[in-house]
Amino acid sequence: MDLFLLRHGIAVDRGTPGYEDDSQRPLTPKGAARIHRIAQAAKQLRLKFDLILSSPYVRAEQTARLIAKHYKMEDRLRLIENLTPTLSGAALVGEIHEKYAEALSILLVGHEPGLSMLASTLLTGDENMLMLTFKKGGLCKLSVDELSHSRCATLEWLSTPKQMLNLD
């Protein structure tokens, strides 16, 4: 299985009037434009996804919907609680096993620090062992023979948003 981890795009700042609820903060126009370009770059790299799983927080959902639109995969996008900022890696792995085991390539759209902790767990067995930081729009690919909430993955690559945006 290939797991792609994508952090949501640039969002409205915390505490912005009208967006006191963190889950309701949307992408900024700049954030949406960058995700649009990152989606184009992903297609240029011939990345393929069977399924897109996203946090239901507005900024992550908007990010996932932009990617899904580029890939014409709107019907294969699912919003799941296990990708919110306080994600439980064990619960997420369990949900993937239970509901999405047939998928060979999954894009996970979420938040920090959850994504870096998940990557660390899957790569080393310890959520704090590997210090990765996903920039907004950062993307990585993990290869997994058998998904478990422990050391089970190989890091294929990690890309900053800047690298993705400079593919043109």
Image (spheres, grey):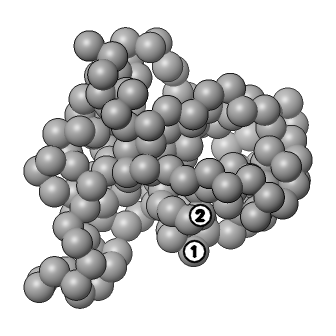
In this picture, is 28 found above or below 69? Answer: below
From this viewpoint, is residue 130 visible?
A: yes
The residue that mark 1 highlights is 86
The residue that mark 2 highlights is 114
Q: What element carries label 1?
A: loop
Seen from the viewer's position, the closer of residues 158 and 146 is 158
In this picture, is 20 found above or below 96? Answer: below
Amino acid found under the numbered disc labelled 2: Gly
Q: In this view, does 76 lie to the left or right of 105?
A: left
Residue plotted at (55% across, 43% down): 5
Q: In this view, does 121 lie to the left or right of 9?
A: right
The residues bearing labels 2 and 1 have C-alpha atoms spaced at a distance of 6 Å
Residue 38: x %, y % from top left: 32, 31
Residue 85: x %, y % from top left: 51, 70
Amino acid found under the numbered disc labelled 1: Thr
| Structural crowding at the residue carrying mark 1, measured as other residues with C-alpha within 10 Å and reported as few (<14), some (14–19) or many (≥20) | some
